[in-house]
Amino acid sequence: MSICQFCNQPKKLIDAHIIPWSFYKFLKPVDEKHEPPLLISKDFEERRSKGSYDKNILCAECDNLLGRLDNYGAIALKFENLEIIKTNLAKINNVEYGKFGLFILSIIWRSSVSTRKELNSVTLGKYEDEAKDLLRIAINEKSYISPDYLVVLNKDKKLPIEIVENNIMLPFSYKFHGLNVTQFTLPGGFKIIMKFDKRKFPVPLDVFVSQSKAVNTVHCMINNNFAKTKDFEFMLNLVKG
């Protein structure tokens, strides 16, 4: 028996995915002989058909509880829910900002308590217990309050769709405009940046977040030039390396 990181009880632990398994089903093989490329971390690339999981963090019961948020996130990011408002803005219909944020938080919390090498940069520090409390409250359907976050939808007509949409990047933490944030990318080109800092996002990003929270709707900023981003540069360096 080991201690489950979520319920703090001695339990038999299971292989718990960091990124929910349902998202790997979105990935399409590049060809019949190769699995799709998965960007595992900011340090290296590997092909893993089963993704990244940790057998030392969750019992089956708690994994199933967090699975409720995973299911919400998987349904939320189906393309039929995505509405393009204009060239640089979209929204995800029928999805609540707070509840979707808790799905994001659950992935980052799992990354923070994990000891997997590829997740070494992710640490919530003093926010780790607070994050767990927010998740517990949400699972009991009492409140859906999450840290502030941004969603960026990467697109680029000049690149093959597999490069933009057919990858998963595991969470990593860094400084964003001097703020403590954690970022990861899901299939479909959805890049998510969640803030773990009492300071606000810089204007106009803070205005963008505030407006989304006010109407409890997930809006996405669209980046139509993915080839010009640091994320794409990182991908190229991994492939060349």
Image (cartoon, rainbow, N blue to C red):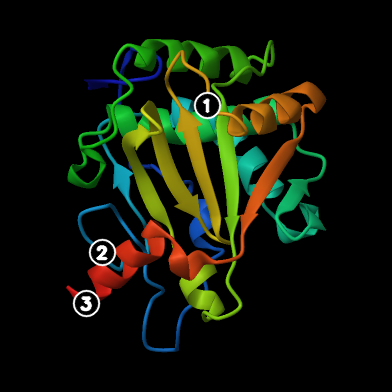
Q: Nearer the viewer, mark 1 or mark 2?
A: 1
- The tag on residue 240 is 3
- Name the spot of residue 159 as percent of width and height, x first: 52, 79
Figure quadrant of residue 138: top right
Q: Earlier in the sequence, mark 2 or mark 3?
A: 2
- Name the spot of residue 78 as percent of width and height, x first: 70, 56
Q: Earlier in the sequence, mark 3 or mark 1?
A: 1
Identify the residue at image location x=38%, y=14%: 127
Dot 3 crowding, Cα within 10 Å, few <14, some 14–19, many 20+: few
Q: Which residue is mark 2?
A: 45
Q: Which residue is mark 1?
A: 201
Give SS at disc 1.
loop
Residue type beneath disc 2: Glu
Give SS at disc 2.
loop
- Name the spot of residue 119 as percent of width and height, x first: 26, 41
Which residue of the protein is positioned furthest toward the front in this rendering? 203
**Alpha-carbon distance for marks 2 and 3?**
11 Å
Foreground of the two, 129 or 163 = 163
Residue type beneath disc 3: Lys
Q: Is residue 14 left or right of residue 70?
A: left
**Alpha-carbon distance for marks 1 and 2?**
30 Å
Figure quadrant of residue 65: top right
